[in-house]
Image: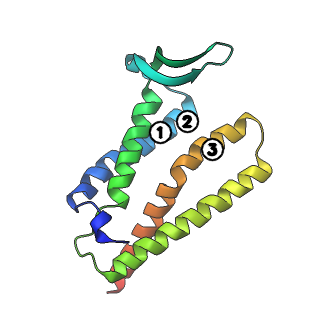
């Protein structure tokens, strides 16, 4: 992976600051269905299809943006953590970064294939929502695990 495409190292700390709390809050939201009342607002929607309601295109709708805010914080945090340079960025780290990304994509698609085979109904929609985030989670976990395992050996 070209280091030209990586963010400066200072973004990694900001990323962890966003990634960890948004992951925890996202898990809590998925388990409890919590929505912050103060995050109900009017937003512009390109398309809105409410259950048992009418479909709307290019309109203003009133909705709770708790999931949106947490999702954005998670994505920004995960991108900052996953794609920031290490303090010492060398060929080994570049190779580790690339192999971790490839490994994460493989694992993600194996999980997705299993979901296609064994999960049906509205539960499949939930699996697809989680699937949006698993590539970055697997990549970050594997990269950091192998990086720290190898830095202890050196």
Q: Which one is nearer the viewer's eye here, 114 or 28?
A: 114
Say few, some or many: other residues with alpha carbon within 10 Å of mark 2 (under 14 / 14 to 19 / 20 or more): few
Tell me where residue 44 appears, x and y as whole percent: 42, 21
Tell me where residue 67 appears, x and y as whole percent: 47, 31
Mark 1 touches mark 3? (CB < 8 Å): no
Label 1 vs label 3: CA separation? Answer: 15 Å
Q: Where on the picture, by quarter, is residue 122?
A: top right
Residue at image position (31%, 63%) is: 5
Query: Going from the N terminus, do you reach mark 1 or mark 3 first?
Result: 1
Residue at image position (34%, 61%) is: 83
In the picture of the structure, the residue carrying the numbered disc 3 is 128
In the picture of the structure, the residue carrying the numbered disc 1 is 26
In the rendered image, the quadrant that contains the N terminus is: bottom left
Q: Where on the picture, by quarter, is residue 6?
A: bottom left
In the picture of the structure, the residue carrying the numbered disc 2 is 30
Disc sitting over residue 44 in the figure: none
Say few, some or many: other residues with alpha carbon within 10 Å of mark 1 (under 14 / 14 to 19 / 20 or more): many
Residue at image position (65%, 12%) is: 53
| Secondary structure found at label 3 | helix
Say few, some or many: other residues with alpha carbon within 10 Å of mark 3 (under 14 / 14 to 19 / 20 or more): some
Q: Which one is nearer the viewer's eye here, 88 or 62?
A: 62
Query: Going from the N terminus, do you reach mark 2 or mark 3 first?
Result: 2
Tell me where residue 110 appears, x and y as whole percent: 67, 62
- How is colour applied across the structure in the image? rainbow
**Does 41 appear above or below 126?**
above
| Secondary structure found at label 1 | helix
Q: Is residue 134 left or right of residue 21?
A: right
């Amino acid at each position: 992976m070209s280091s030209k495409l990586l963010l400066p190292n200072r973004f990694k700390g900001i990323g962890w600051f966003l990634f960890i709390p948004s992951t925890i809050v996202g898990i809590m939201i998925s388990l409890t269905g919590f929505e912050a009342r103060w995050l109900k607002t009017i937003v512009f929607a390109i398309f809105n299809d409410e259950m048992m309601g009418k479909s709307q295109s290019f309109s203003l709708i009133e909705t709770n943006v708790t999931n949106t805010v947490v999702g954005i914080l998670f994505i920004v945090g995960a991108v900052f953590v996953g794609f920031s340079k290490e303090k010492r960025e060398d060929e080994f780290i570049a190779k580790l970064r690339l192999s971790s990304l490839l490994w994460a994509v493989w694992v993600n698609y194996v999980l997705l294939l299993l979901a296609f085979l064994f999960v049906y109904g509205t539960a499949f929609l939930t699996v697809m929502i989680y699937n949006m985030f698993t590539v970055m989670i697997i990549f970050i976990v594997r990269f950091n695990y192998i990086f720290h395992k190898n830095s202890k050996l050196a």
